[in-house]
Image (cartoon, rainbow, N blue to C red):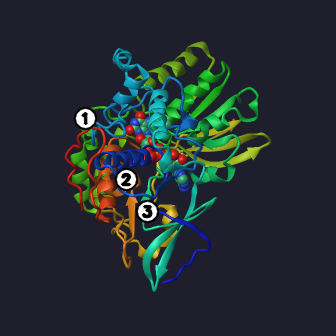
């Protein structure tokens, strides 16, 4: 095994998290609650490296008029500890909107949810280094035994024995579009940054690829951006489908389902995942389906067709032609080809998790894999390591393949998972409990039975 020695380690830290989005913030809340409960911080030197400048929630796709799709009780803390001061209820109370929110009769908007997350993050400033993305993770090994990791950012290198992966999922970019990425070809994760490129009027002819919520929202937004925009909505399958909204498939988001899912063999997990996939992916809301279909229908009535649906379509080539793009679609059933000329392309193709997160590439000799090649991650989110001593790597929202659909791209497990992670971290460091000195009204709930 190779031995690595990194030049210029700037600092040793007790815990490092990559990412300070909802999953990272929820972990910081759990650590802070623990500190308040016990009168001292469980770890002195904890840092969450966040590549963004702040904690705006998916800011480049924060569209007006969109709602969250989970219950507000599934916030950053409530399922773990309904008394935590970081709850959505506490946020509303502090903003003076607790009663008014109750009259809304609809879920919280994404704008409000992002504001809630930023409100929590602002109270945890000591934990985070913004604008400091993690570029790489290097092994620190002696005689082949992994003893720690060096976390490399643009500003320095930091050594730790406890690494938490809270960096979310990766935008999925189909191969045909990769060479053209940038400018007017972009994923929805870059939408608001790129849509008004150059600052002039919005481009007229768009292609939106995908059938999920983000693709639907991008189509709606583009059609509303100017009275003359045209959108080609391209789908591999039949078109926009309504997501599974029934209670029964959504029981997959209950905590006990994570136990059930995690206990399965990898092959079975994949089968179960596919069965419930449409609860969270590749589906849109009923009202959005209604409104998009109506828009298309009205185009037929008036002859002014601005929304064109291309079902059963595979993209076979993309070429830049002057300032525009020619895109060839092939009907996957008939083989008939259609050529579209557009000014911009939006990839509403969702997010994915790779078998091994790219940041762990250099740690591969020490990573244990499941039989299907994915990282072995135990129920308490600990990545299984071999030939290592005292090193802990934790998956925080990056273990969809082992923990199921509620564990990534969803708020469902964010709070409870933070308790598992806190317990797993604490288990590596027996500590002297200091007397409780804070907040007499604060009582700690029973722990999730997670302490490994
Ligand atoms: C538009 C949109 C709407 C959604 N709506 C809902 C909803 O209503 N309900 C729901 O349950 N789920 C929703 N989701 C899913 C949502 O992504 C998750 O619920 C939640 O954001 C996951 O939090 P996370 O922290 O795991 O990941 P993310 O939110 O992706 O946060 C990851 C953080 O890590 C940072 N990061 C990434 N790489 C690095 C690096 N190398 N170095 C440093 N920092 C890094 C990122 O900048 C980001 O801040 C939505 C997703 C999108 C895209």
Position of residue 138 measured from the top left corner of the image (x, y, whole percent): 53, 70
Q: Earlier in the sequence, mark 2 or mark 1?
A: 2
Residue 209 percent location from the top left of the image: 56, 40
Q: Position of residue 354 (x, y in %)?
A: 46, 59
**Spatial distance from mark 2 to mark 1, Cα to Cα?**
19 Å
Task: Using a 10 Å C-alpha cutoff, classify the residue at mark 1 as few (fewer than 14 neighbours), some (14 to 19) or many (20 or more).
Answer: few
Q: Quadrant of residue 426?
A: bottom left
Residue 227 located left or right of residue 129: right
Q: Could you give the CA–CA distance between mark 2 and mark 3, rounded to whole angstroms? A: 12 Å
Disc 3 crowd rating (10 Å Cα; few below 14, some 14-19, many 20+) is some
Query: Residue beneath label 3, please?
Result: 14
Q: Is mark 1 within 8 Å of ligand 1?
A: no
Instruction: Locate residue 256, reporting x and y percent.
Output: 21, 47
Which residue is drawn at the image coordinates 34% and 60% (left, top)? 425
Q: In this rendering, is residue 414 above or below 269? A: above
Instruction: Give the residue drawn at x 75%, y 31%.
Output: 199
Mark closer to the chain start, 1 or 3: 3
Mark 2: give few (<14), some (14-19) or many (20+) Cα within 10 Å: some
The local secondary structure at tag 1 comes to loop
* N-term-proximal mark, 2 vs 3: 3
Horizontally, is 270 left or right of 345 in the view? Answer: left
Between circles 1 and 3, the one closer to the viewer is 1
* Closest to the observer, 214 or 204: 214
Residue on which disc 1 sits: 441
Which residue occupies the extreme right position in the image? 322
Occupied quadrant, residue 11: bottom right
Q: Can you identify the residue that label 2 sits on?
A: 41
Q: Badges 2 and 1: C-beta atoms under 8 Å apart?
A: no
């Amino acid at each position: 095994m190779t031995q690595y020695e990194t030049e210029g380690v700037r600092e040793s830290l007790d815990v490092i998290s990559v990412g300070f989005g909802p999953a990272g913030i929820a972990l910081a809340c759990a650590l802070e609650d623990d500190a308040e409960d016990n009168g001292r911080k469980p770890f002195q030197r904890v840092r969450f490296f966040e590549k963004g400048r702040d904690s705006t929630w998916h800011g480049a796709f924060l569209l007006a008029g969109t709602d969250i799709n989970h219950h507000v009780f599934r916030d950053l803390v409530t399922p773990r500890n309904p008394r935590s001061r970081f709850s959505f209820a506490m946020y509303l109370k502090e903003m003076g909107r607790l009663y008014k929110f109750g009259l809304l009769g609809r879920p919280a908007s994404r704008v409000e949810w992002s504001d809630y997350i930023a409100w929590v993050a602002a109270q945890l400033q000591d934990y985070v280094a913004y604008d400091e993305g993690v570029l790489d993770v290097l092994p620190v090994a002696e005689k082949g035994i992994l003893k720690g990791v060096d976390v490399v950012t643009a500003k320095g290198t930091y050594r730790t024995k406890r690494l938490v992966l809270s960096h979310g999922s990766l935008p999925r970019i189909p191969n045909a579009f990769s060479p053209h990425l940038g400018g007017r070809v972009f994923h929805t994760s870059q939408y608001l940054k790129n849509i008004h490129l150059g600052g002039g009027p919005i481009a007229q002819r768009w292609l939106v690829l995908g059938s999920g919520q983000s693709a639907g929202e991008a189509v709606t937004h583009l059609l509303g951006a100017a009275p003359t925009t045209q959108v080609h909505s391209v789908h591999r399958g039949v078109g926009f489908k309504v997501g599974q909204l029934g209670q029964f498939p959504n029981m997959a988001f209950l905590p006990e389902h994570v136990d059930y899912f995690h206990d399965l063999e990898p092959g079975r997990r994949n089968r179960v995942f596919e069965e419930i996939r449409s609860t969270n992916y590749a589906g849109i809301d009923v009202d959005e389906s209604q409104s998009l279909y109506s828009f298309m229908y009205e185009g037929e009535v008036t002859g002014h067709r601005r929304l064109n649906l291309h079902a059963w379509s595979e993209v076979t080539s993309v070429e830049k032609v002057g300032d525009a793009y020619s895109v060839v679609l092939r009907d996957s059933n008939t083989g008939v080809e259609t050529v579209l000329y557009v000014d911009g392309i939006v990839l509403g193709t969702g997010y994915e998790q790779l078998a091994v997160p790219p940041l762990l590439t250099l740690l591969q000799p020490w990573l244990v894999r499941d039989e299907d090649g994915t990282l072995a991650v135990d129920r308490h989110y600990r990545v299984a390591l071999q030939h290592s001593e005292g090193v802990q790597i934790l998956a925080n929202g990056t273990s969809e393949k082992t923990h199921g659909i509620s564990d990534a791209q969803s708020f469902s497990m964010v709070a409870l998972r933070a308790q598992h992670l806190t317990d797993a971290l604490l288990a590596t460091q027996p500590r002297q409990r200091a007397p409780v000195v804070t907040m007499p009204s604060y009582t700690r709930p029973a722990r999730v039975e997670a302490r490994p």
